Image: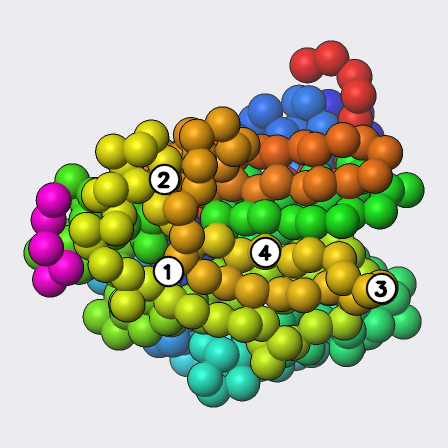
Amino acid sequence: MAGTRTVRILLVGVGNLGRRFCRILAAKSPRLEARYGLRLSLVGAADSGGIAYAPGGLDPGLIAALKERGDSVRAYPGAGATGTALELVREAEADLVCEATPVNLAAGAEPGLSVIREALARGMHVVTPNKGPIVLAYRELVGLARERGVELRFDGTVAGGLPALYLGARDLRGAEIRRVEAVPNLVTGYILDLLADGLPWEEALGRARDEGALEADPSFDLDGWDAAAKLVIIVNHVLGYPATLGDVEREGIRGVDPGEVRRARARGGLFRLVARAELVDGGYRLAVRPEEIPPGHPLSHLGRKGMGVVYHTDIYGTISAAIREEDPVPSSATMLRDILDIYCGRSTSAP
């Protein structure tokens, strides 16, 4: 179409989210060009085994296929090479970086944090579903993006594909948000529902692990760190309140009594790991803890693969949103949503 704009993209991290993002690019490219006048050209990719770079563009479907058969992007014909993600971002010519490396709070959110810093410093937009850099360096990264005149978007860092951050930060502008309640962690809800079904703890954990929902080291989810990290992002970005992980009163689900979970279901309630920010004396009290959600609450209808958020405001009432996320596709698609928001803004026109 006339006036088509090409956006050159570097993808750092080609795991569960990155390779699915490649599949989305391959499938959606014709519609994106026809509807939005955008040609999204993947010119570079990096994983732990190497890089691939082609100024004229890589085939995102081939990148996904390489990863699905267990290869590195370094095996890309004619474009693969040894090198690191940071080297690719420092040297390649691109407009935007999609950073999708694993969350690594214990190691300073690396390599994602350094990649994002470098991309912003070079004047490239960044989109990321990686909560680690945003939790540890929110104000630094937002300030760097503003200084360089580029965009930093991270809608996928909270509650998977649910636009929880867009809803709060953009659609509730002008309101005082007095309380936020969220169920932002999927796997703990799944485990709690298995307990409600009558499964013992170890069997519930084993099933979650077998289905790929629970990592080999489950502490990040089970001990509430993931939910706390997502709450910190909401509080900083939506509420404009400076908070760190140390400000969150945190209790995971390891100490939950399965009998209590089953009794909650018998009463029509739902047991979940709830993240909450409540306005108190001009500041916010932050907590993550397992609790029973009573019938009639906006979050009481979440299924075992569901996440949700509720915003209690002074002028817009109480607004809630939820998602059922059966696989990682919605989480990976948040990178596309962020890209379209950067280049197309908010459209109210009909499809």
- Label 2, on which residue? 270
- Label 1, on which residue? 15
Pair 1/2: label in front: 2
N-terminal-most mark, 1 or 3? 1
Is 271 or 79 nearer to us in this picture? 271
Q: Is residue 111 visible to the viewer in this orientation of the structure? A: no
CA gap between label 1 and label 3 equals 42 Å
Secondary structure of the residue carrying tag 3 is: loop
- Label 4, on which residue? 276
Pair 1/4: label in front: 4
Query: Which quarter of the image is occupied by the N terminus?
Result: top right
Tell me where residue 84 appears, x and y as whole percent.
48, 80
Question: Image quadrant of residue 289?
Answer: bottom left
Please rate how many residues cluster around mark 2, counting C-alpha atoms within 10 Å: few if below 14, some from 14 to 19, many from 20: many
N-terminal-most mark, 2 or 3? 2
Pair 1/3: label in front: 3
Amino acid on which disc 1 is placed: Gly
**In the image: residue 227, left or right of residue 119:** left
Tell me where residue 332 appears, x and y as whole percent.
48, 47
Secondary structure of the residue carrying tag 1 is: loop
CA gap between label 3 and label 4 equals 16 Å
N-terminal-most mark, 3 or 4? 4
Secondary structure of the residue carrying tag 2 is: strand
Query: Over which residues does the magenta segment extend?
Result: 198-202
Q: Residue at x 11, y 62 (%)?
A: 202
Q: Does the magenta portion include 199?
A: yes
N-terminal-most mark, 1 or 2? 1
- Label 3, on which residue? 282
Q: Residue at x 36, y 36 (%)?
A: 269
Amino acid on which disc 4 is placed: Arg
